[in-house]
Amino acid sequence: MVISSSNSYSKNNPDLVKISSSNKINLKKFIQNGQVQIYQSSYRGSYSSIIRDSLRNAALGRKVLLVQFMKGGVKQGVANAVKLCGNLTWVRSSYSFDQYDSEEIENNENLKKSIHESTFELWDFCKKELLSGENDQIILDEIFLAIEMKIIDKDDLISTLENRFISGDVILTGTDIPKDLLLMANQITELRS
C-alpha cells in the first residue's frame, strides 16, 4: 500500500485516499506495478547492458531475476539457478536451441521436444515469479524468440504481464516484437550496432 504525503497526489487520486468527517482514513487497496520495458535489437546478443544493470541492481540490494530463455551451454534449468551478489538469480534453459544448428533441431524430434519442454519450464517458473511479488526486477531475455518459435503463447505473456505483482520493472528483450506487446510497454528502447 502506498500513501503519499503530497497534497497534489491526494487531489489527483481522490479514490485512493478518502477522509471522512470523523477524521478516519478509508484506504482503497491498490497494487503498484512497475513499468514494462522492452529492449529490441536487430540481432541477438546485444543485451549486455541489461545484464550489467541487473548485476548493479543486485549489488545495491534489489532482488533481481534474470531469465535467459534461448541461451544455452550451461544446462542450468530452474533447479540449477545461479545466485550472484546475493540478490541476483540467473536462470538459463536446460536445453537451448542456440547450441545446435537449426536444421539439426528440425530433423530431431527428441531434441526439439527437449528444447520446447525446458523453455516452457522456464516460462512456467517466470509466471509464478511475476505473480509472487518477491522480486524487485525481472528480466525475460529473448522471450520474443520463444514466442516466435511458438514455445510460449503471446496471449499468455500479455495476460501474465497484466496480472503481475512486482513493484519494480519487467524487462523484455528480443528481435521480433509483437505489436500488441509494444503497445502495452511503458518504455521501448531500440539498440543499434
Image (spheres, helix red, strand yellow):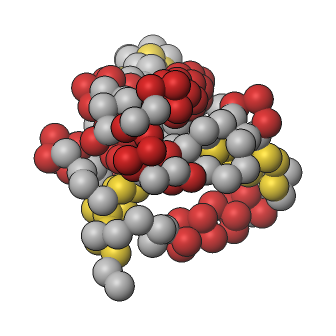
Residue 161 image offset from top left, x and y in percent: 37, 32
Question: Is residue 169 visible to us here?
Answer: no
Q: Nearer the viewer, residue 130 or 18?
A: 130
Q: Is residue 15 above or below residue 86?
A: above
Q: Is residue 42 left or right of residue 171?
A: left
Residue 50 image offset from top left, x and y in percent: 53, 66
Q: Nearer the viewer, residue 18 or 168?
A: 168
Residue at point 45% right, 44% down? 104
Residue reaching furthest to the bottom: 193
Residue reaching furthest to the right: 86
Q: Nearer the viewer, residue 28 or 46?
A: 46
Q: Is residue 186 above or below residue 166?
A: below
Residue 148 image offset from top left, x and y in percent: 28, 42
Residue at point 55% right, 71% down? 48
Query: Disc count in the image?
Result: 0
Corner quadrant of residue 34: top left
Residue at point 64% right, 44% down? 92
Q: Is residue 91 left or right of residue 108?
A: right
Residue 46 image offset from top left, x and y in percent: 45, 72
Question: Is residue 98 visible to us here?
Answer: yes
Q: Quadrant of the C terminus?
A: bottom left
